[in-house]
Image (spheres, rainbow, N blue to C red):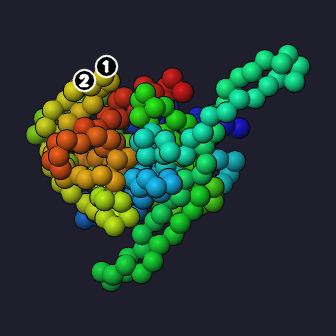
Amino acid sequence: VTRTILVLALVCFSAGAAPPSWRDKLPPADKVPQYLQDVSVTIKAGSAEGSGVIVTRLVGGSKTNFVWTAAHVVDGLRSTGEVIDPGTGTKRQVIKFQDARIVKELVENGRRVGELAMDASVVRFSKTEDLALLKVRKTGFVDASAVFYLDDPIPPIGTKLLHVGSLLGQLGANSMTSGIQSQIGRTLEQIEFDQQTVTAFPGSSGGGVYLENGAYIAMLVRGAGEGFNLSIPVRRMRKWATRA
């Protein structure tokens, strides 16, 4: 079952399955800000708060919402234990996760009117890659779904970008900032990142970085100042998804 869920959630990254018309799924230019609000959520994981991006797929005929986020956002939910095989007596280590809390802000007429909060299980996690995939337990939580940038050319330095994340956690939920692609292919601890100037603070981790047309190109994960940020590019997410 878990394998099936992963295939469905990650199929958008498969070179053979990527639809040639992914650009047709992007919203009209004047709807991009609202679309980015719709696909963005706050993630609460114990005392930690971060950001996430929703991807919606059909699983067994039911609309299922997955959330991409940074592994370090949900790392505090992880626990390690041992189980003993009753037949052989062999011990093996098992890793379990408590559920994360997915929070969706509700705004009407320029005022916050409430929130929706749902539990989500961790279905895939890599501390090394700093990537995690969650599954919202309630089916059809929202209709929105991110549109991934699937072209081969890497958006060049100077490309204008948008970021939506929960800056400072729930306090700054769904804050939109702007910036540019400031460098490509930064290597830190043998892991590849891109660098952007979109304004971000603690809590932005796991939030999406987008082209001005709304295409999801990267996940913000690290920062050394509000305008110096490192993100995991979609091209690296695709490689991880293929291995998964």
Query: What is the C-alpha distance between the residues marked 2 and 1?
Result: 6 Å
The single residue placed furthest to the left in the displayed view is 158
| The C terminus lies in quadrant | top right
Residue 162 image offset from top left, x and y in percent: 23, 52
Between 169 and 90, the one nearer to me in the picture? 90
Q: Is residue 6 left or right of residue 148?
A: right
Tell me, yes or no, if residue 120 can be seen here.
yes
**Which residue lies under the disc numbered 2?**
187
29, above or below 9, in the image: below
**Could you say whether the residue bearing mark 1 is in a helix, strand or loop?**
loop
Identify the disc placed on residue 132. Answer: none
Q: Amino acid at mark 2?
A: Thr
Q: Residue shown at 31%/43% (left/top)?
A: 220
Q: Residue shown at 41%/29% (left/top)?
A: 129
116, above or below 39, in the image: below
**Could you say whether the residue bearing mark 2 is in a helix, strand or loop?**
strand
Total marks in image: 2
Between 129 and 4, the one nearer to me in the picture? 129
Q: Amino acid at mark 1?
A: Gln
Residue 85 image offset from top left, x and y in percent: 82, 23
Residue 189 image offset from top left, x and y in percent: 30, 22
Tell me, yes or no, if residue 11 can be seen here.
no
Q: Are marks 2 and 1 in contact (CB under 8 Å)?
A: yes
Between 7 and 176, the one nearer to me in the picture? 176
Identify the disc placed on residue 190. Answer: 1
Q: Crowdedness of circle 1 by 10 Å Cα count: few (<14), some, many (20+)?
A: few
Q: Residue shown at 69%/47% (left/top)?
A: 60
Q: Crowdedness of circle 2 by 10 Å Cα count: few (<14), some, many (20+)?
A: few
| The N terminus lies in quadrant | top right
